[in-house]
Amino acid sequence: MSTVLETEEHQALRAAVAALGKRFGRAYTTDLARRGEHPRELWEAAGKLGYLGVNLPEEYGGGGGGMAELSIVLEELGAAGSPLLMMVVSPAICGTVIARFGTDAQKRAWLPGLSDGSLTMSFGITEPDAGSNSHRITTTARRDGDGDGWILSGRKVFISGVDISDATLIVGRTEDAKSGSLKPCLFIVPRDTPGFTRTQIDMELQAAEKQFELVLDDVRLPADALVGGGPSRSGEAGSGGEDAGLLQLFAGLNPERIMGAAFSIGMGRYALERAVDYAKTRTVWKGAPIGAHQAIAHPLAQAHIELELSRLMMQKAARLYDEGDDIGAGEAANMAKYAAAEACVRAVDQAVHTLGGNGLTREYGLASLITAARVSRIAPVSREMILNYVSHQTLGLPKSY
């Protein structure tokens, strides 16, 4: 794929990450997925080379880059057949939120480990009766008596990688003493906190990163568990965690969508490359490989075009986010996630179709992508909700919900 809009540094990053990905490859990740094991060796290698924290501040051990760089890392690992799903969560969502809104103590405690991969963090927003609708979240935080701590109660579902994470960034709601209304806040909940329990969800899809239902049964947390600390400091509106929860939440969701796009583009590229290689060499009719026939060549060309277009939107979203334009990035990130998911599904479908029966064999590593690609249409936000967003936020049409 072309890189004409990227700097030499970005192109060098792509090449280096691609080399790392190829050292491991799809056989490595699929074997671990069948055994239900996290690709720890690859995770540690990526952390040691500085790829996991490329978006985090240099003063805390990161690379000082942004979502433009982190999305390159995930895309290239995916294109090599060895994506790391927890990159979407740990450095992209949690690392970004803590880097932008955390207290100095929170940054010192978490960012160095998130940067080098020695610490991992999950993200808990989805609830059984609310999905990802932050306005319906019922996980509630209340003050712990007369102290400065918190008591957190609620449930979460489809939370990735909790078993391998040192903590989970939980989205809850805290009561505003002045108005009595509820508003979102983010809390860092260490894995072994009393009252914080997890149950693995039995998924049909094989993946190294397991999914969990979480129960928070009057979980007691210290004051410094609230991202950003307490109420706003004098003269600094929105600086505290009780006031900036909504800002914090959407500061994490935009990177999530950008990285979701990177994940999809990488997967689509992997599938397309397998199909193109096969179409160049597979000969059924006398005189020419099947790739010479337009019925095979044109759909593959279309898949390539759609992946390239979705990557351009992803690059736009990453640039807007890195420049601090959260509103512009929100629109572009949603569009990028939508476009990349659609392009990925079509690329995988066409790749399997190109290989015919071979596309369903373990040797070529494409069959499992049929299901995995469709996850990109659902998570972290469904394509229908993105269309809702664009219809009323971009086009100004009335809300349907």
Image: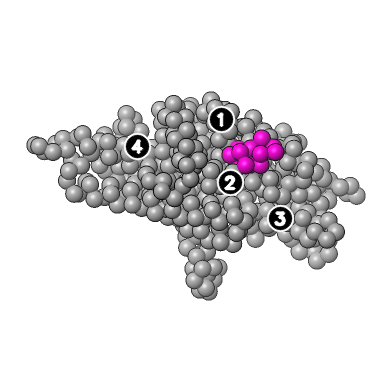
**Disc 2 vs disc 3: Cβ atoms closer than 8 Å?**
no
**To which residue does mark 4 refer?**
366
Scheme of image coloration: one colour
Q: Which residue is drawn at 46% across and 47% down?
A: 6
In the picture as drawn, the residue positioned furthest to the left comes out as 286
Q: What element carries label 2?
A: loop
Q: What residue type is labelled 2?
A: Gly
Q: What residue type is labelled 3?
A: Gly
- The magenta segment is 53-64
Query: Where 325 sits versus 21, above or below?
Result: below
Q: Find the distance from the CA under tag 3 to the CA under tag 4.
A: 41 Å
The reply to whether residue 283 is visible in this rendering is yes
Q: Position of residue 104 (x, y in %)?
A: 77, 43
Q: Which amino acid does label 1 sit on?
A: Leu
**Disc 4 vs disc 1: Cβ atoms closer than 8 Å?**
no
Q: Find the distance from the CA under tag 2 to the CA under tag 1.
A: 16 Å
**Label 2 or label 3, whichever comes before in sequence order:** 2
Q: Find the distance from the CA under tag 1 to the CA under tag 3.
A: 33 Å
Q: Residue 245 carries which label?
A: 3
User: Which is in the foreground here, disc 2 or disc 4?
Assistant: 2
In the picture as drawn, the residue positioned furthest to the front comes out as 8
Q: Find the distance from the CA under tag 2 to the CA under tag 3.
A: 22 Å
User: Which is in the foreground here, disc 2 or disc 3?
Assistant: 2
Q: Residue 66 carries which label?
A: 2
User: Which is in the foreground here, disc 4 or disc 1?
Assistant: 1
Q: Is mark 1 on a helix, strand or loop?
A: loop
**Label 4 or label 1, whichever comes before in sequence order:** 1
- Name the magenta segment's main secondary structure: loop
